[in-house]
């Protein structure tokens, strides 16, 4: 494996461009932007689902995604992409079904090389297939699977990338112990009906002499960007590469990693990349904990304390809905709850503008509360939206 | 116009990846890598050529580019792209001629908006046209025109971008007085037989909130990168954008801006962009001065002194050909000549590895001598290749 140049702590800074509030009216008001999907506790759940998923394909294929998928956003989604699809004259010529049944495909492929993916994509593009990319770091859980299901609804070909990207880990972070299970991931992804996995090794993505980085500046400066210098640079760079390799029409990301989602959206817009970025609602365990591959590192006691994050966020949302607009007050209810936990170290709680990612003193119309904590040696993040639900696509 | 965030002087640094000499044998040995095309002095020449070009199309169209085009590299080029073309099954279905006659096109378009270019390109791609991009900052001279001619030989659709990119100028540099003449450029480009110009304004390329940069690290650290902090960051970013907007099959750059050429090649490889980068030989005035839009700023006396740069480089090459391998000795002959000029300030003279851009103590097989000087308030660069000529495409 190639040694990856650590991009270090000298993140480039830019003078900020003049601030101006961008007017982007919400399409539809809804009171529940973060959808809670009740689930069995992590480990058990993923196993069960994997089993279930492998069994499912035997049944009659349905045009709708699995029942578990959150219904509301799904409905909304069908409306919007249709708009885009009508723009593409290619659509009418398509013979394949718009929504594939969720069953493993005989043509399912595990691709390890960039050249193989390019060839694969080239073929699909020739047939005017709409391609979706779901970039992951593996260790798939229900959150990832919800992205894949939505990808099926929006595209003909679904490609899932599995790559634990070393450049988005700091030197003292958990790269080495980040859960890896390509065989398990392969099973789950195949069962999900995806068309292919792209699982390169680090040398394939960062060959000798690699030295290029994509920096999205303002929106990555604070919060996780402050705690994890070079993290977003690593994430933006690898996603830029994946977009160039796969040339997807759409790419799906979880809203749990909210700052990452905003960073990728900004990058795509700034670099004129032709990808629609879809942000999908956070999927949660039964106890409210946002699903994360890192949850498996928590002891039962730590797990209990970790749930205080979502409890705090929910409390802040209720306070907002009861009329509170002061950001400090809204943050305070989260902080108060977190401070009750003995083994929990608070990284940040911030109330920010959902696009510019700047702290706001007051939530005028919409905002987002971001939180990051450390429980034992596990870093966890979560967030909750205040105000009208925004469109998932911009 | 939007105010552009100045990316400032905090260029990100990377720990260097372990060095390993990459073996890339030259395809063909030749003793004259830098082709000298004798020309009239700058201003006059460009005017005359523009006239000539507009007259030419009346004559019978030839499949070969204008006589002026360097013959040797042209031959080589026809061989290599053929290789690529055979890979693309699209090629056989093409009805249009592979090489268009050089005459103005009735369909010639001036595009100002990104969306218009994307639409234009979309149409061309549908017809399976091979697209060439020639990125320029305008103020076109014979060097640019040689790129356009070669583009015609290698692609069906030739798009020339004209954009004086503010982010590649430092705060104390000559952005304001950089020559601009869109009307003249438009005439020349149209006469050259190109299909379209893309001439966006700064607000179109850097809308409010723009904050993303592409950094190519090691190869931009020294030489012009040291003298012009953030210059290559600006250049790489705008070229990455142009590549995403135009999605060209090939893009042509002059070898005069050698460090830029290496930077773009590195970026394309690192970010997995699908563009073949063609480096074209430096076109020179009759007195040997490398053509540059900045030459117009030189007084006759300064102009005379500026020519010492190429005289020095040529002398170094002769010394190399007579057997000298010591880089310090090779640089010394250039420095000695430059030091004789009263109004000339030396920025650097360096003998470097042509791929890694690292100084080499000895020219084993191949090397490149880079030079940069300041004459009055005009910064000029030039270079000469030592050793076998490398392929223009990698």
Image: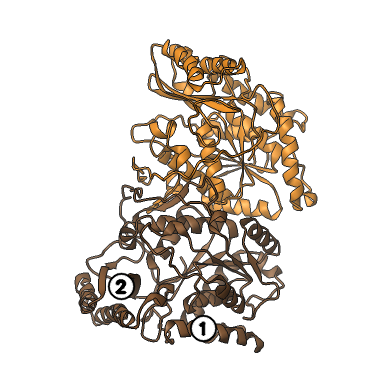
Chain colours: A orange, B brown
Left or right, B329 with reference to A171: left
Q: Chain of mark 2?
A: B
Given the current orientation, which residue lies at the most extreme bottom position?
A: B59
Residue A292 in the image: above or below residue B36: above
x and y, in percent, of residue A253 in the image? 57, 35
Q: Which one is in front in this view, the residue at disc 1 or the one at disc 2?
A: 2
Circles 1 and 2: CB atoms closer than 8 Å? no
Residue at the (41%, 60%) spot, across then down: B169
Q: Is residue B314 above or below residue B219?
A: below
Q: Quick one: A106 or B136, which is closer to the camera?
A: B136
Q: Secondary structure at mark 2?
A: loop
Mark 1 residue element: helix
Q: Depth check: B30 or A285 in front?
A: A285
Residue drawn at x 61%, y 57% as measured from the top left: B114
* Quarter where residue B250 is shown: bottom right
Q: Is residue B71 visible?
A: no
Near mark 1 (Cα within 10 A), the count class, few <14, some 14-19 or many ≥20, is some
**Horizontal relation, residue B158 to residue A55: left or right:** left
Q: Position of residue A193 (x, y in %)?
A: 67, 36
Residue at the location (49% across, 72% down)?
B139
Give coordinates of residue A324: x percent, y percent. Answer: 56, 17
Measured as percent of width and height from the top left, residue A154 is found at 70, 39
Give whichever of discs 1 and 2 has the lower sequence position. 1
Does the image show residue B184?
Answer: yes
In the image, is B94 to the left or to the right of B338?
A: right
Which residue is labeled 2 in the image? Answer: B376
Residue that badge 1 annotates:
B47
CA separation in Å, label 1 and label 2: 25 Å
């Amino acid at each position: 494996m190639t040694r990856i140049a650590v991009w270090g702590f000298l993140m480039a800074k830019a003078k900020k461009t003049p601030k101006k509030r961008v007017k982007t009216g919400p399409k539809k008001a809804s009171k529940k932007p973060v959808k809670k999907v009740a689930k069995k506790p992590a480990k058990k759940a993923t196993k069960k689902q994997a089993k279930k998923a492998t069994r499912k394909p035997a049944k009659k294929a349905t045009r709708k995604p699995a029942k578990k998928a959150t219904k509301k956003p799904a409905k909304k989604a069908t409306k919007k992409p249709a708009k885009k699809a009508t723009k593409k004259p290619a659509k009418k010529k398509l013979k394949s079904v718009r929504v594939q049944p969720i069953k493993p495909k005989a043509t399912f492929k595990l691709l390890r090389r960039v050249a193989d993916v390019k060839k694969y994509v080239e073929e699909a593009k020739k047939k005017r297939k709409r391609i979706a990319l779901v970039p992951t770091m593996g260790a798939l859980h229900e959150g990832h699977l919800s992205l894949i299901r939505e990808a099926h609804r929006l595209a003909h070909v679904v490609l899932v990338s599995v790559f634990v990207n070393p450049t988005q880990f700091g030197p003292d972070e958990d790269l080495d112990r980040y859960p890896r299970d390509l065989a398990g991931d392969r099973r789950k992804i195949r069962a999900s009906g995806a068309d292919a996995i792209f699982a390169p090794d680090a040398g394939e993505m960062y060959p000798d002499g690699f030295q290029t980085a994509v920096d999205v500046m303002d929106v990555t400066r604070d919060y996780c960007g402050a705690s994890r210098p070079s993290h977003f640079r690593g994430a933006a760079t690898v996603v830029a590469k994946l977009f160039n390799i796969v040339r997807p029409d759409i790419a799906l990301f979880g809203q749990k990693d909210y700052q990452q989602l905003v960073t990728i959206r900004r990058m795509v817009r700034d670099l004129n990349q032709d990808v629609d970025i879809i942000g999908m609602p956070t999927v949660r365990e039964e106890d409210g904990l946002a699903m994360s591959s890192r949850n498996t590192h928590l002891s039962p006691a730590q797990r209990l304390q970790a749930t205080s994050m979502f409890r705090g966020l929910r409390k802040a949302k209720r306070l907002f809905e009861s009329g509170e607009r002061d950001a400090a007050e809204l943050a305070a209810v989260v902080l108060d709850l977190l401070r009750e936990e003995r083994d929990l170290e608070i990284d940040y709680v911030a109330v920010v503008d959902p696009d510019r990612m700047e702290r706001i003193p007051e939530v005028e119309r919409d905002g987002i509360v971001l939180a990051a904590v450390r429980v034992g040696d596990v870093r966890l993040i979560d967030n909750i939206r205040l105000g009208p639900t925004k469109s998932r696509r911009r």
